[in-house]
Amino acid sequence: MPQPSLAGWLTLRRKAIVLLALTVVAYLSALNRDQSLPWAIGALLGATLLTGFLWPRWLVRRLSVTRRGPSRAEEGETIRFRVEVSNPGWLPRFMVELVDRLPFVGLADPEQGGGEKVLGVLAYLPGRRTSAFDVPVLCEKRGHYRLGPVSLASCFPLGLAEARLRRNDGVQALTIYPDVFSILGLPLRGAPSQIHRGGYLLPEGAGAAEFSGLREYRRGDNPRHIHWPTTARLNELMVREYEPLASACLSIVLDQAAESNVGLGKESTFEYAVRIAASIARYGCTQSIRTRLAGAGGQTWLQGQPGTGDAHYQGILDQLAVVDCDGVTPYARLLDQVAQTTIRGETVVIFLAEQTARTRETLHALTLLRAKQANLFAVIFDRDSFTAAGPAGDNAQLTAALIELGACYVPVRRGDDLVQLFNR
């Protein structure tokens, strides 16, 4: 925490300094007079000064506090912490404030930053008793945070000095995941080298399917697949069963270069990209599409293996919760590395938010991906809309180049409804 300035220190202790000065003046006056009243005034002021400093320390002494709550949450979700304060002594305590260090509070406003939050104030806590209450907290920004310590503070009764006692009991870590939205479909294409067995519905352009046999009709089967000769012979509906020869593969490539990020806080191109990447990953994993994540950051590199299912998606979420745009690797170089492991027919999701000077290199890398018969799905950010002025930008040349490469694309501006954009 930043150290307070001298002016701030004097402001916080102004009452105590004034009272101390009055006490000194009273005793100096008593030394020059043979009267009892100045001594009594000095003693009263001295007792008040001692009470103002010692009583708050007694109020928080031996108190214990525990904070309980979830260890995982989603961005934008309001969670509840259960706070319990116990007084093991016989005497009651008054006006005790509970202050917690919650780094994620206030991060949605880049000017404010995370810090301390007052959980509540206990006006009265009897001896040998425990008080409990719930505190709602908004999870403003994704990330992995260390919480606490919880502090017990009091400046009762005179407000001359604050006594603070820190406790480390309770939940100590919280992971906030990106806010994920629903995607009903994506223009994905299959990879013929990946054999998928089962009842998975092939995406557009996935290739052919091979006849594998007949089985009894089940509710929901396509009536066009009914094999009428066998149905007439057995007097029972029979349908053809097919084995797909190809399934979709999906690579999500994040641009973690610091120079590519535009905007502040949650209203930045990188935060939009993380949210979109998490939503596409959920769509892929729940649709049995082999999905992987790639990125090159300063502290966090994304080089996961492709996979499907809930466990694989959870691993992707864990990475996206802490990923940052602190890298120096150009996006074109990262795409070149992805191209080395790309298989024929794989769909590569790209995020284009970099400066115009980098566009030529990136388009060259995308051409290499297309040469390896990868399919491109591009998210194009309007950089100008994420600045303070927010005028509409012109991405006509970039869009034309992507169309020439046969890529599908979605333009994104600040404030757009992502659910509508990706479910048209």
Image (spheres, rainbow, N blue to C red):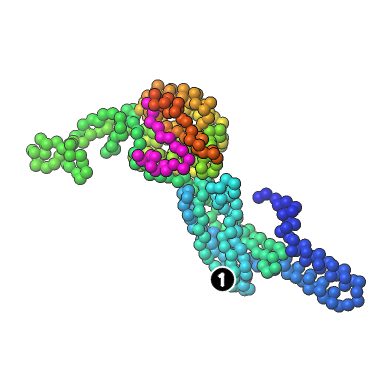
From this view, report whether residue 218 is shown above or below residue 102: above
- Tally of numbered tags: 1
- Kindly identify the residue that appears in the image at 53 percent across and 26 percent down: 357
Whether residue 88 appears in this view of the structure is no
Question: Is-magenta flag for residue 422?
Answer: yes
Q: Which stretch is magenta?
A: 406-424
| Residue 398 image position (x, y, % from top left) | 45, 27
Q: Nearer the viewer, residue 274 or 261?
A: 261
- Kindly identify the residue that appears in the image at 88 percent across and 77 percent down: 35
Neighbour tally class for label 1: few under 14, some 14-19, many 20 plus, Cα within 10 Å:
few
* Left or right of 60 in this view: 354: left
Residue hosting label 1: 129
Q: Nearer the viewer, residue 401 or 37?
A: 401
- Kindly identify the residue that appears in the image at 67 percent across and 67 percent down: 156
The three-letter amino acid code for the residue at tag 1 is: Arg
* Left or right of 407 in this view: 139: right
